[in-house]
Amino acid sequence: MIKIGVLALQGAVREHVKCLAAPDVETVIIKKVEQLENIDGLVFPGGESTTMRRLIDEYGFFEALKEFGAKGKPIFGTCAGLILMSKHIVGQPEGHLGFMDMTVQRNAFGRQRESFETDLIVTGIGDDVRAVFIRAPLIVDVDENVEILSKFNEEIVVARQGHYLACSFHPELTDDHRFHQYFVDIVRESINTKVQA
Ligand code: GLN
């Protein structure tokens, strides 16, 4: 059984649990640092990145999460989760967990377009992926080791760097589970590679 956690300090947790469902996947709602030891992959949900960061510090998650990523365990961040994973944030002196070599801009669509939906081509997932944007961030710059999986109006909205996957919108708010299954495949691969090593 593959065990995938959803960080449950704040934000849209239950929706991710639903999307991760697969016969060989057990989903774990992560509320305590010790739970990280028993999981193979982790999802950072959407919500509010500054609040999430505050809770990460308050509950002593910061170092444990850094270690989790450094061990090669896959992490998937959506929206606020993407912001947590980025090395740089426009207008802020430093990023949060800084897993991915990229720069994000928070609330990048301005007030007029706080939330909207569209269909996007996402490499490796599909050419008709429904994307729900809610006060979404954009990835404004990536290093060459970051793979761009999708753009919306020339702006990067999905990126992958090895075992890290990040997305500006909310795939967990649709009935299409392909995005999560793509992440589950990353987790499966990481387990198989470890077994062979
Ligand atoms: N704007 C939020 C932030 O900066 C992210 C919004 C979301 O996760 N839906 O954290």
Image (spheres, grey):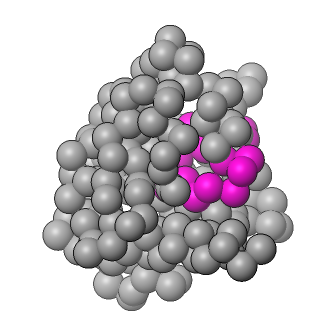
Q: In the rendered view, tell whether residue 97 sits above or below residue 160.
A: above
Toward the left, the furthest residue is 175
Q: In the rendered view, tell whether residue 5 sits above or below residue 53.
A: below
From the top left corner, tell me how far across and down residue 140 is, in percent. Answer: 65, 53
Residues 61 and 117: in front is 61
| Identity of the residue drawn at 33% across and 66% down | 25
Q: On the rendered structure, is 72 left or right of 158?
A: right
| Identity of the residue drawn at 39% across and 86% down | 126
> Would residue 114 be seen by someone viewing this image from the given angle?
no
Q: On the rendered structure, is 86 left or right of 2?
A: right
| Identity of the residue drawn at 50% across and 28% down | 33
| Identity of the residue drawn at 64% across and 43% down | 68
Residues 152 and 125: in front is 125
Magenta segment boundaries in residue numbering = 69-89
From the top left corner, tell me how far across and down residue 107 is, in percent. Answer: 45, 38
From the top left corner, tell me how far across and down residue 108 is, in percent. Answer: 49, 44
Which quarter of the figure is the C terminus placed in? bottom right
